[in-house]
Amino acid sequence: MKIAFIGSHGVGKTTLCYDLAARLKRQDRAVDLVKEVARSCPLPINRETTLPAQAWILHTQIAQEIATAAQHDIVICDRSVLDNYAYLVHSAGRQPAYDALVKAWVGTYDRLFKVPIVDAPTFDGLRDTSQTFQHDIDALIDELAGDLGLTCHALDPNARDGWIDAVLTESGLPLHPPQIDLFSGAAAAK
């Protein structure tokens, strides 16, 4: 199963990835993360990005997803090709070759969860802090998802504490690890 958290920068996708992975690890699941690849891009990102930079990010994202899926039953992605493509579209406009690539690759996700903007982005050493840019990317993600006919499960901005439970439920995964009945043997012995 491959789950991706999508959305603009600074909305909490990375935190959700780690929280979900921790919950699944407690269920003894073979799970791993595909971390946000833009942070390791050797080319400009954010508003200064270029077509080559975004191409690098898209291809690296796909390569990381392939490698991680080969070794784990559950893959959690901090972004998807869809929201990475939104940054390319913002910078260079729609690209027919990348439209086709993104359209083909989004079918590999079992679930896409759209993380809403709740707060303005904060600077973390790399993240762009422009609220206008943050909202532009958010709108582009919605537009691209609509154009591609994708089902993105929108997380409720007013229920942030319940997001992980919502993701687990929507993904058909249990909310809690199975409990071992320590007393069933004692009860049967009586």
Image (cartoon, rainbow, N blue to C red):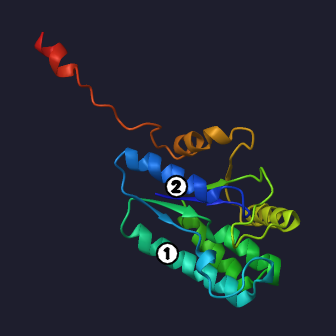
| Amino acid type of the residue that numbered disc 2 sits on in the rendered structure | Tyr
Q: How many marks?
A: 2
x and y percent of residue 175 in the render? Answer: 47, 37
Question: Crowding at label 1, few (<14), some or many (≥20) Cα neighbours within 10 Å?
Answer: some
x and y percent of residue 146 in the render? Answer: 76, 61
Q: Earlier in the sequence, mark 1 or mark 2?
A: 2
The residue lying at 57 percent from left, 44 percent from top is 164
x and y percent of residue 76 in the render? Answer: 51, 60
Q: Tell me if residue 168 can be seen.
A: yes
Of all residues, the one furthest to the top in this rendering is: 190
Question: Crowding at label 2, few (<14), some or many (≥20) Cα neighbours within 10 Å?
Answer: some
Asked whether, in this view, residue 103 is left or right of residue 183, the answer is right
The residue lying at 45 percent from left, 50 percent from top is 22
Of all residues, the one furthest to the left in this rendering is: 189
Q: Secondary structure at mark 1?
A: helix
Q: Is residue 168 above or below residue 187?
A: below
| Amino acid type of the residue that numbered disc 1 sits on in the rendered structure | Gln
Q: Is residue 160 above or below residue 74?
A: above
Asked whether, in this view, residue 99 is left or right of residue 184, the answer is right
Which residue was labeled with disc 1? 64
* Foreground pick, 117 / 90: 117
Q: Which mark is residue 18?
A: 2
x and y percent of residue 41 in the render? Answer: 62, 83
Q: CA distance from mark 1 to mark 2?
A: 17 Å
